[in-house]
Every structure is written in C-alpha cells, then in structure tokens.
C-alpha cells in the first residue's frame, strides 16, 4: 500500500504516457527537430527474430547482479517498493531513472549509440507502440526475448497482450501498462451522452470539440469513424480519413488539437467533449472530485501499450529479463496497478486489489475500490473487442507517408 500522495503527483491526471505531452511541449522547436530526425532515419530492415536468433543472443549470457532501468516519470511509486522487493529476492540492484519524456526524443537520443553497437546505459526501457517502436524493430536494435525466462508472463499475462499486432508473439517486448483513447465529456454541458466517434462531428458542438494533435491518435479516429480498422489500413484509408477530419476542422467544430492539455478545458467547459485518454479521466475524477465521463465509442477506440524491452547492446540483459518477469507476478503487478491506475496486463490483479481494499480504511480503501471496480483499469472482454492498435509501419518511407497525410491537419 502506498501512502497518501498529493493528487498533483498522480500519474493519471497529468500523465497518460505520464506528462509526456506536456513535457514534449517544453522541448519546443528542439523537440520537434528531434522527432523529425527520428522519423527520417534510414536503415536496413531487420528480419523477424527466429528461435535461432534467440538462442544465439542469449548463449553464454549470465546474471551480473545489476540492471539499469529507463522509464517515464510517475510510472512507479517514488519509494520504489517493487524494486526493493526484487532486489531482496534476487540480489540484483536496480538503478531506476525517469529519463524518458516522449518516444521521439528518446529514440533520437539512443539511436546513434545503438547504431554504433554501443550500450545506451540502460538494460531495460519502456517505449510505446507506434512509430519509434517500429523503428527500433526495423533497425534491429532490440534483443529477441527468451520466453523460457519469462514464466510469469507466460502464466499470468492476459491473452490480449500476447496477440499484439505491433509485436506478434511478443518477440521483442512485453507490456508495462496500457490505456485507451476514447471520448471524454462533461455531463454538465453534454446532456445526451455521446456514443459514437461521429458525435465529434455533430454541428451542435461547434467550437466545443477537442481532438488530439498526435498523428496516430488523430488518424485512428478518422479511420474508425469511416469504418476502417487502423491496424489493417492502407494509404487510401489514410487519405479518406484525413478528408473526414479536414471537413470537421473546416466547419469550425474543433476548438483545438490538444497534446496533453485537454483536461482543464474539459473540466471548465471550454470544450464539452474531446478525444481523451482513459487514465486522465479516471484520475481527474479521483483526485479532483469531478464528474467527467469516458466512453468507448461504438465504432471502436484505440488501445496503446507502453512496453518493456531490452536494447540489443544491454550490458545486463539476463538481469533485465528477470526484472521484466518479476512484474508479471500478480502480487507485484497489483502493487504497480494500485499506484499508476492504468490497464494492467495481468488480470488476476483485480482480486488482489479488492483484497487490499478490504483490509484498508479511509481514503486508501475508497481509492482501491475505485481502481478494482473501474472498467478503465480492467476493461471487459467486450471492451477489448472494440479496441484497436495503431498502424504498424513496415519501413521509414511508409511512416513518412502516413505523417504527411495527417500532420498538415493540425499544423495549418
């Protein structure tokens, strides 16, 4: 159980992917330049990892007694109770650093060393599925995972997280946590709850709709409203989706394309409904006592996943994969979920959190009950059936083509 923490520090409110969006804005033009350079990196596509590659990579590698772990801010209780438990159980020390602020700048930072075959200073890192994840795989920068060293993942991970379209078979990654992109709305202003992405095009909400500026998030909603599954889409689908989104913009329905900063205007009524991340809505209500609502639209919604992975140049890969698997023990996964309040890849944590709630009191009890009962932390099978991933890109040219279709919508 973590002690009461200032709500402003809780991940969910300011932090789907942590305050990645806010922090990325602080990077300004320099950050944009890093993002662009990351997208333009060329390289020979790495072949899919085969069992022989796994054996070759892991042959002769041994536990060294230390692991360096790079993660996002506020993605673990700052007292690091899980890491202390891991060290006590294994003797492996962990240097944990919250050094990742957004995927593109992080990729731009580590890419030169990975390209040179050098260590990036971390044995384990967390990266979101999307453009940079595809780049890491394409350029052959990730270690192929030996699933014989991941017994907890094999036993306890939900089936859905073993069928990721961006990494089929979890060849290079296993999930840290997930969240959903759906529709957030303020019932003080929206009397009839939205049920569909198409509601974001309703003229009665002119000037009161928020959309996301992230090209993959925006593109996904443009495709879903057209009845297209983003993960299986092609260039013609992107063009049609962009036309649909342009029509919404040109009619003045969109107030703004937001980064992470939509919660405040949604709460104040500057926007009435918006694309939103599940954890943001959940934590805003928990920490501020608001009554914002979140819905998974009937056309479908997006699920994004932050993934643990081992750089191929890691100094301590055996220690890193042991730490990976440690977080799939249900007790450890529950401890993590109780703090970050995002979708856990270990569904059996729900009963553990309920048990913890029964033994708690006061605000801790209420908070744990809310986590255990929330469909935003534990989506139903019906919810999962409506969730879609981002489009996995085959190469840099395809990524650049996608970006060229959607980025002009928010830049003009």
Image: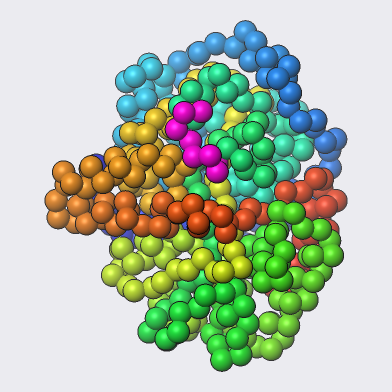
Residue 118: within the magenta? no
Q: Is residue 265 left or right of residue 284?
A: right
Residue 266: image quadrant is bottom left
Q: Is residue 152 left or right of residue 392?
A: left
Which residue is pictured at 63% across the width and 15% down the height? 58
Residue situated furthest front in the rendering: 382
Which residue is pictured at 46% across the width and 28% down the height? 155
Q: Give the image location of residue 135, x and y in percent.
A: 73, 42
Residue 369: image quadrant is bottom left
From this view, report whether residue 374 is shown above or below residue 357. Answer: below
Which residue is pictured at 43% across the width and 62% down the height? 280
Q: In the rendered view of the protein, which quadrant contains the C terminus?
A: bottom right
The answer to whether residue 271 shows anywhere in this view is yes
Q: Looking at this view, is 77 or 289 the one in front?
A: 289
Tell me which segment is drawn in magenta: 154-161
Q: Give the image location of residue 75, x and y in percent.
A: 43, 46
């Amino acid at each position: 159980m973590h002690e009461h923490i200032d709500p402003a520090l809780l991940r969910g409110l300011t932090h789907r992917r942590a305050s990645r969006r806010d922090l990325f804005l602080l990077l300004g033009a320099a950050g944009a330049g890093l993002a662009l350079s990351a997208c333009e990196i060329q390289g020979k596509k790495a072949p899919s990892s085969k069992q022989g590659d796994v054996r070759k990579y892991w042959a002769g590698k041994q536990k060294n007694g230390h692991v360096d772990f790079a993660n996002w801010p506020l993605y673990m209780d700052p007292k690091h109770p899980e890491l202390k438990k891991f060290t006590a159980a294994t003797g492996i020390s962990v240097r944990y650093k919250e050094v990742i602020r957004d995927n593109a700048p992080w990729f731009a930072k580590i890419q030169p060393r990975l390209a040179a075959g050098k260590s990036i200073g971390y044995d384990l890192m967390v990266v979101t599925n999307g453009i940079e994840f595809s780049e890491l795989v394409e350029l052959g920068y990730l270690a192929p995972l030996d699933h014989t060293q991941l017994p907890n993942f094999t036993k306890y991970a939900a089936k859905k997280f073993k069928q990721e379209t961006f990494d089929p078979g979890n060849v290079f990654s296993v999930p840290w946590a997930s969240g959903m992109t759906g529709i957030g709305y303020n019932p003080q202003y929206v009397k009839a709850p939205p049920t569909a992405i198409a509601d974001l095009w309703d003229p009665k909400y002119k000037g009161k709709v928020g959309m996301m500026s992230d090209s993959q998030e925006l593109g996904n909603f443009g495709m879903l409203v057209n009845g297209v599954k983003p993960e299986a889409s092609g260039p013609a689908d992107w063009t049609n989706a962009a036309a649909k989104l342009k029509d919404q913009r040109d009619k003045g329905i969109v107030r703004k394309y937001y980064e992470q900063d939509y919660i405040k205007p949604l709460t104040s009524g500057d926007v009435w409904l918006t694309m939103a991340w599940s954890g943001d809505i959940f934590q805003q209500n928990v920490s501020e006592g608001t009554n914002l609502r979140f819905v998974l639209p009937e056309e479908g919604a997006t699920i994004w996943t932050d993934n643990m992975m081992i750089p191929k140049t890691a100094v301590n890969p055996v220690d890193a994969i042991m730490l990976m698997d440690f977080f799939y023990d249900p007790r450890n996964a529950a401890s993590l979920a109780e703090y970050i309040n995002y979708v856990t890849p270990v569904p059996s944590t729900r009963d553990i959190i309920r048990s913890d709630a029964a033994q708690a009191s006061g605000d801790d009890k209420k908070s744990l009950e809310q986590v255990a009962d929330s469909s935003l932390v534990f989506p139903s099978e019906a919810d999962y059936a409506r969730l879609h991933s981002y489009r996995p890109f085959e190469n840099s040219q395809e990524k650049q083509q996608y970006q060229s279709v959607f980025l002009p919508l928010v830049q003009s």
